[in-house]
Amino acid sequence: MRFLRTRLRAYLLLAFLACLLTTVSLVVLLPRERVTRANLEKIELGMSRAGLHGLLGPPDYQTVELGMVNGPNSYSTNFGDSAKELRLRGYRDYTRQQWHSPEITIITISDTDGRVVCKYSGEGQRRVNEIDIVWYWLRRLF
């Protein structure tokens, strides 16, 4: 009996150390959130797309659209009028990129040269991952 208890303690200690090492590794190695208010403040007008991606990582969403930059923090689109009419009124092609985190959504508008001409933010959004999907289906089944 004593042999079994000693061996069981050794296995429990090894399991505990493995869990502790795994937890520490995940905390150290997992990427830190890059989409933050502090990083929004680091985005400057004229910044390149490469600079943006270096700061925030690849965007969660990107599109090229016809829009108008009204100021450094104001951008508008109009889907009611024709492209020809909009271009006559000063609308141009811009790239809109968005990054999301639970804290904040960061949106940048870049010109055709890839330089930031406008930036603004919105409410944070919870990211959906594989674990969320599994939990969703398990809750539906039971």
Image (tube, rainbow, N blue to C red):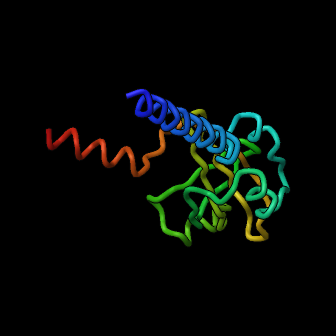
As drawn, 65 above or below 23: below
Residue in the picture at 77% in, 54% down: 117
Residue in the picture at 68% in, 48% down: 29
Q: Give how far across and how far down residue 87 sits, in percent.
A: 62, 68
Residue in the picture at 68% in, 42% down: 32
Question: Quarter of the image holding residue 46?
Answer: bottom right
The one nearer the camera, 26 or 93, is: 26
The one nearer the camera, 133 or 36, is: 133
Q: Give how far across and how far down residue 31 sits, in percent.
A: 67, 47
Question: Quarter of the image holding residue 122?
Answer: top right
The one nearer the camera, 38 or 24, is: 24
Classify the position of the N terminus by image quarter: top left
The reply, left or right, for residue 87 in relation to residue 37 is left
Residue in the picture at 76% in, 63% down: 49
Mark count: 0
Q: Give how far across and how far down residue 51 sits, in percent.
A: 81, 58
The reply, left or right, for residue 112 in relation to residue 27 is right
Classify the position of the C terminus by image quarter: top left
Q: Give how far across and how far down residue 27 sits, in percent.
A: 65, 39
The one nearer the camera, 56 or 11, is: 11
**Looking at the image, which residue sits at the far left?**
142
The reply, left or right, for residue 9 in relation to residue 101 is left
Question: Quarter of the image holding residue 58?
Answer: bottom right
The reply, left or right, for residue 80 in relation to residue 77 is left
